[in-house]
Amino acid sequence: MTGITQEERKNRTYTAAAGAIYAVLQYTSQKDSYTLTDVMGLTGHAFRINIHPEDVSPAGPTMFSPTELLEKGLNNLGFAAEQLYGFPTPAPLEKLEQAIRFAQETIDRGIPAIGWSLFTAEFGVIYGYDDEKQELYCSDRAQDGPLPYAKLNELQMKFVFMLRIIGELTVDPLAALKTALAGIVQFARGKAPTLSDTFKHGLAGYDAWIQAFEGGKVNPFGNADNARIVGDAREYAVEFLRSLSEKWTGDGQEQLAIRSLSQEALPHFERVVEAFRALQLRFPFPHGGEPNDPVQAAEAIKLLTVARDSETAGIAVLERLLEQLNMAEA
Amino acid sequence: MHVVTEAAAWGSVEDELDNEGAAAELKDEQLVELARTGDREAFGELVRRHRARALGVASTITRDGQLAEDIVQEALVSAFLRIETLMEPSRFRYWLERIVRNQAMMKLRRSGPGGRASTFSEIAHRLGKLTEEEWNDCSLLDRMLFRIVERHGEVPYNETDPQARLMRKEMFEGLYELLLCLNAKERAVFEAHVFRQLSPIEISDALGMSVGAVHTSISRSRKKVQRERIRVYFRGYAEEKKQAGRPTRRVLAPPVRL
C-alpha cells in the first residue's frame, strides 16, 4: 500500500484536517469553488511536515492547535469558523450536552461540524444527530456511522473538540494565494506556531527525520505514517502548483509571476514526491518495514536528503513568488 | 418497585420504635435477618441501637451537627435498602459506620473550602485512611451517586411531606435504573463497593475473586453506570426539546469519503 491512487486522490487525502475541511465545504454555497487540491494548497496543508527527531512519532502531523490546522485555512477559503472550548473526558454531563448542542446547531443550519478523534485519532465530520436514539452520525477515515452520545465520553484521545462554520467571508483570490504562500514559507522556515518545540516542522523536519534514522530509534508505524502523509501532501503540492498556471491566465504582472514561478517550483516538488514514493515502498504502512536496520536507514537518509534539498530549492522559488506579488501590490 | 416503596416509607420506622416491642430482646444478627424479610420493626430496632454512635462518627468527621444528622439519615436509608447484601449480620454496626463515614467524607469533599483536592487532604489528615489513589479510584462513581442523593437533599428531610417522599422515590428509582445495566456478577461487586463500602481486597475475599478481577469489575461497572447515567440524562434532553417543539433528529447527506 503505497498511497492513494490518482483516481482516489481527486477526493481523498491522508491529511485529515484538509479532508474534513473539504468534506464540510460541500455543504456550503462554495462547494463548486474549490477542489481538494485547492484546499490542500490554499490551507498550506500540501506543504506541511512535522517530525520528532528521535522516533518520527505518528503524532507529528497534528501537533498544532486547531486554529493552525483548521481555522486559518477555513478563513483563507472564505469561511468564518468557531471552536468549541474543548475538554478532556470523562466530563460532566453538562459539558457533553454543550458539545452535542454545538454540533446540533450547525447541523440544523445544514452544515456538519468537524470533530476530533471520533472513531480514530484524526479529524472527522459530524453530519447528523438523533436525540431519541442518542446518536451522532459521524464519518472519519476509520468509520462512518452512529456514535452514541455516551461514547463522546470515551473517545480514543480522551478529549472532545469540535469546530463549525458560522459564516462566509469575502476573499480576493490573489490575497488568498498570497496568504497561503506566506503561510507555506513561514511553515517551511520553522516559524509556525506549534504545540511542541521537540517536533521540527518545515525544512528542519527533514533534518529531524534524518537525525532519527541516524539514532536508530525510529518508530516503524510513525515513520510509515509520516511518509504516507507528507508524501501524499506533496503530491497535492505538485498538483496545486500545476493548477496555478491554468488558473492565473492573463498578462498582468501578478499572473505572469504566478505562472512562471509556479512552473519553476514544480520540478523541485516533483523530486520531493519521487523521494517519498520510494520511501513509502521501503516503509509500507502500517507495519513500516525495518527502519532501524542500518542498510534501510542509510537508504532512507539518502531519500530524505534529496527531498530536503529539493524542497529547500522549491520553497526558495515560492518565497520569490511571494516577494514579487507583494512588490506588485506596492 | 418493591424495595423503593419500603425505603420511601421507612421514615416512619423510628416512630414505631417507641413501642418497645419484642425486637428489643433480639441480637443484631437476628434483627438483620428479620429486616431482610421486610420486618420494619426489626430495622427500627437496629436504628435505635446504633443511631447515636453513627451520629457520633458523622459529627466527628463533619463537626457540624445538622450535616451529621443528614448524613446518618442518608446512610440509614442506604443501609435499609441494601441490608440483604450485608454478609455478616453480626457486623451490622461496623457496616453502618462505614457507610456513615464514607458519606460524611463525600459531603466534605464536595462542600469543603478550596474544592476537592484540599478537602481531600483535610479528610486524609483527619482520618489518615484513604490514599490519594484510593480516592481517585472511587471519586467518579461517588460523584455520580452523590449527584442523585444531592437532588434529593435539596428539599427538607421530612418524610411526612408527600413531595419529599416522591423525590426520594425518584432518587432510588434513578439509582436502580442505573444499576440495571450491570450483569449479576458486576452488580454483586458494584454493590459491595458502593453500598457496603468495602475495599477491593475485602470484596475479593467475600466473593472469592482475585483483587485484580474486582478492580476490573469495578472499573467496568463504573463505565457502564456512567454510560447509563448519560443515557438517562439525554432522555430528559430529548424530552425537553420535544416539548419545546424543536427537532430531535436531523441527518444531513453523508459526507464525501474521508
Image (cartoon, coloured by chain):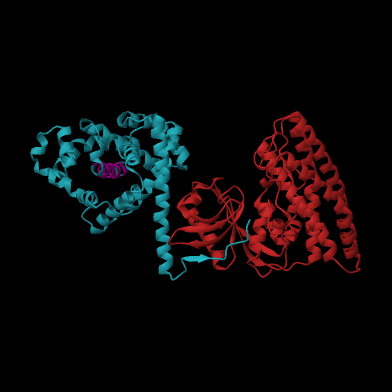
Q: Residue at x 71, y 65 (%)?
A: A78
- Magenta-drawn stretch contains B251: no
- Frontmost residue, A298 versus A6: A6
Residue B89 in the image: state x and y as whole percent.
21, 33
Q: Residue at x 13, y 46 (%)?
A: B16
Q: Residue at x 14, y 32 (%)?
A: B27
| Vertical order, B235 against B190 (above or below) | below
| Vertical order, A108 against B111 (above or below) | below
Residue B164 in the image: state x and y as whole percent.
26, 55
Residue A4 in the image: state x and y as whole percent.
70, 52
Chain letter, cyan: B
Asked whether residue A319 is in view, the answer is: no
Residue A117 in the image: state x and y as whole percent.
58, 49
Asked whether residue A178 is in view, the answer is: yes
- Frontmost residue, B53 versus A114: A114
Residue range (magenta): B67-79
**Image quadrant where residue A279 sits:** top right
Q: Residue at x 74, y 51 (%)?
A: A233
| Vertical order, A300 against A103 (above or below) | above
Q: Main secondary structure of the magenta part?
A: helix
Circle count: 0
Relative side of B241 to A161, left or right? left
- Magenta-drawn stretch contains B71: yes
**Image quadrant where residue A70 sits:** bottom right
- Image quadrant occupied by the C terminus of chain A: bottom right
| Vertical order, B237 against A118 (above or below) | below
Q: Colour of chain A?
A: red
